Image: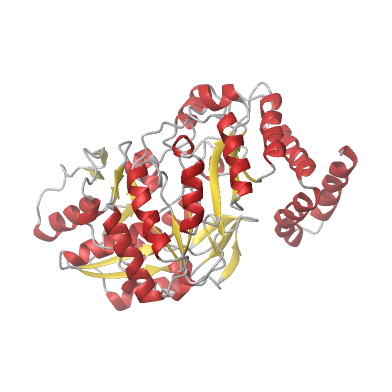
Amino acid sequence: MNRVLLINPPYYIPDGTDFFPSFPLGIGYIASYLQSLGYSVKILDAFAEGYENQANYHRFHRIGLSDKEILSEIHNFSPDIIGISNMFSLLHYSLHSTAKIIKEYNKDLPVVAGGPHISAAPELVMRDKNIDFGILGEGEYTFSKLIKALRYGEDYRDISGLSYRDNGALKINRPLGFIENLDALPFPAWHLFKMDKYLYQKASHGGAVKKRPFMTILTSRGCPLNCFFCSVRDTWGRRFRMRSAGNVIQEIALLKEKFGIKEVVIVDDNFNFNIERMNIILDYFIKEKRRLILDVPNGLFIPNLNKDILLKMKSAGFWRIFFPIESGDEFILHKIIRKPVDLGMVKQLVNYCRKIHLDVVGYFILGLPMETKETMRRTFKLVRELKIKPYFSIATPFPGSDLYRFAESKGLLNSYKIEEYSAEYNINTSEWNNKDLKEFILYEKFKLNPLRTLWFNFKSTLPLIVKNPKKIVYYLRRTFHLVLQK
């Protein structure tokens, strides 16, 4: 049990959804940690390496290497164990379809699932008999302990963060703790990846990048907030843990030396949660004299922002700011979402960003169970007042979130099937059903930006038109309905 294959599987995504190859930091860290213990590790990023291979697959759009190509890589490397990453619940089929072909190839080859989806919903994932083990939470220590136990015939049943079957019965060991000293982890195993697949992409998961080559980094883990719709705590825990400023700077310097990066995309959930550490990192970028630019697409902790911090971020190379505002309605924001955001403060910060020529993007979520059309109109009104680029998300009840548990307990879910509740518009309330919500949001978006809305409406409908030309009538009727309403 020495040869370990880590797979980022092909993506099976709904038509009209865009995903770009973004460096898979999770398996990058696990690979480097396993190598530090002496294991022989290979990474197969089937999504990125086969990104040009795109085809319709039943009701999905499949992107990545073919099953034949994946099995060829497995045959050539001859691993003793395989780990499959599953980043998003939306991509659950990617995990299960890959596990299936592996077991058909060799039923005795141990298959391990890891990532946020199984961390949030191990009971769902482990229904698949093609998956032998699941890693809950951080993977470095748990996965290495499992490999060691299997290698030496030791008992793995008490390993923290492991799910498995014992005589057919599912056992779930929730993580007892999380890695405290993140500096002790080696940097991601860049040498095991085909880096050109990431460095020159036109966008990261947070949208378009400004300069290439670019690379993503993670400088902290854990989120002390308790947002209603989020399940990140199942993977990283609630306690904020951070790498030291020196360790982060060392990684950035190494990325610059190895790959000549020009933009750093920081994918933390709370990069500015510790102001002292952030200031040290910003000072480094300021000394670099704008030879690098920065982006934080997951957003920033708004209560820790002020004019001085924003000006320093601008000086350090930030070219845009993502504000996770979430709602323009105070009740929804504070009592339902549970986010400590002062909307008056947000307006002041946005105005200052405009003054110092710092682009602003706002994240908003719509369609929560307690929302009405009036509360959602307040969100659109706020967007118009702020005059910022908005990203609207539909409240989607993913496993592990309080939103899912609440919607399930109140019977508000349109479907209880994972294949269906991973899609948007899965909540129905007494105020609206999902059809009403779709039309309402589309109309409000159209009032904000008619041309952009019509383009995205066409873009999302095009795959349906290609499959079924009769859908062109549906698209035209929907478009004329919008125009006439306005």
Quarter of the figure with the C terminus: top right
Q: How many marks?
A: 0
- Rendering coords of residue 66 (x, y %): 48, 71
Q: Does the image show residue 218?
A: no
Question: Which residue is drawn at the image coordinates 44% and 34% (left, top)?
Answer: 401
In the image: residue 426, left or right of residue 200 = right
The colour style of the image is secondary structure
The one nearer the camera, 418 or 234, is 234
Q: To which quarter of the image does residue 370 belong?
A: top right
Question: Which residue is drawn at the image coordinates 24% and 62% (left, top)?
Answer: 186
Quarter of the figure with the N terminus: bottom left
Question: Which residue is drawn at the image coordinates 59% and 36% (left, top)?
Answer: 348
Classify 313 as above or below 399. below
The one nearer the camera, 72 or 396, is 396
- Rendering coords of residue 292 (x, y %): 46, 66
Question: Which residue is drawn at the image coordinates 57% and 25% (left, top)?
Answer: 332
The one nearer the camera, 103 or 4, is 4
- Rendering coords of residue 399 (x, y %): 44, 37
Classify 80 as above or below 18. below
In the image: residue 96, left or right of residue 209 = left
Classify 5 as above or below 184. below
Q: Does the image show residue 101?
A: yes
